[in-house]
Image (spheres, rainbow, N blue to C red):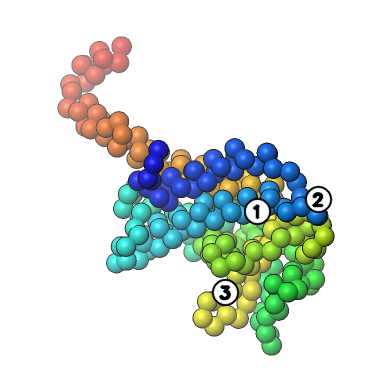
């Protein structure tokens, strides 16, 4: 298969195939070697998460913009993406949700810390350790959850963390923190989503399965002419249909 006909569906599937084929061939980081499992996982997740949001959801909600519009290529999938990334529905109710995510928020106050230099702030790490951090993540709106993840992946708002969920340059990578502002122009908050690498991998599997499942019915109809067959069957007398079934 060469050039994708539906970028937001096919490229995430291809990226996930790379993950399935290559992930277990890589060695775990031991604190001295490059953390290639973490790097592969993060790298393939960018098209998996970003493309459906940028090339389906954006154009579904702003139909006047058409220059990279995948929403018209599969109406069922476009409608499913729009419904799933709901402004009000809790993200744990979405079909694409998987894993034990943790959520925390940091008000700007006098200014945001430089996470590139200082890593995950200790007080935020403690917030994320709290039992209610998991429930707070589950109760985010699906739209807010997806925006945090999309913005973090698109703008480099990602932190590599150790098994305890802390920034540690000498320890193997075991978790990620995805960081996004509440507003790109005049931000007043930082949002943090933390997850283990294992759970993030499970989430990506669920996300790709969701995209593929929502698209499949229309793909089958288009490829096999199911709608036409159903229309033809509706014109056949009942007794003829019954005889054919027997």
Quadrant assignment for the C terminus: top left
Residue 147 to residue 227: above or below: below
For the point 31% across and 34% down, the residue is 223
The mark that comes first in sequence, 1 or 2, is 2
Q: Give the distance between the C-alpha atoms of the residues marked 2 and 3, in whole angstroms.
A: 35 Å
Residue 27 to residue 61: above or below: above
Local packing at callout 2 (Cα closer than 10 Å; few below 14, some 14-19, many 20+) is few
The mark that comes first in sequence, 1 or 3, is 1
Q: Which quadrant of the structure image shows residue 175? A: bottom right
Q: Give the distance between the C-alpha atoms of the residues marked 1 and 2, in whole angstroms.
A: 14 Å
> Which residue is the site of mark 3?
182
Residue 39 is tagged as 1
Q: Please state the horizontal and vertical placement of residue 227, each as a whole percent of the image.
A: 26, 34
Of circles 2 and 3, the one toward us is 2
Q: Which quadrant of the structure image shows residue 244? A: top left
> Which residue is the site of mark 2?
30
Q: Please state the horizontal and vertical placement of residue 120, each as a whole percent of the image.
A: 74, 69
Residue 88 appears in the picture as rendered: no
Local packing at callout 3 (Cα closer than 10 Å; few below 14, some 14-19, many 20+) is some
């Amino acid at each position: 298969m060469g050039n994708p006909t539906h970028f937001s569906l096919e490229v995430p599937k291809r990226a996930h195939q790379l993950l399935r084929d290559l992930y277990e061939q890589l060695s775990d980081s031991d604190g001295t070697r490059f953390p290639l499992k973490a790097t592969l996982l993060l790298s393939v997740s960018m098209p998996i998460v970003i493309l459906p949001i940028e090339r389906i959801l954006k154009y579904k909600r702003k139909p006047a913009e058409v220059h990279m519009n995948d929403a018209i290529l599969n109406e069922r999938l476009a409608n499913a993406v729009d419904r799933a990334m709901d402004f009000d529905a809790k993200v744990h109710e979405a079909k694409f949700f998987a894993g034990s995510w943790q959520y925390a928020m940091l008000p700007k106050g006098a200014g945001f810390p430089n996470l590139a230099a200082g890593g995950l702030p200790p007080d935020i790490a403690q917030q994320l350790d709290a039992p209610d951090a998991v429930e707070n993540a589950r109760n985010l709106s699906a739209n807010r959850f997806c925006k945090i993840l999309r913005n973090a992946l698109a703008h480099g708002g990602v932190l590599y963390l150790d098994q305890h969920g802390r920034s540690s340059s000498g320890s193997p990578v075991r978790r990620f923190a995805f960081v996004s502002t509440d507003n790109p122009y005049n931000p007043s908050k930082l949002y943090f989503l933390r997850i283990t690498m294992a759970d993030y991998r499970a989430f990506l599997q669920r996300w790709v399965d969701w995209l593929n499942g929502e698209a499949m019915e229309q793909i089958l109809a288009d490829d096999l002419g199911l709608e036409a067959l159903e229309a033809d069957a509706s014109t056949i007398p009942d007794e003829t249909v019954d005889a054919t079934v027997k």
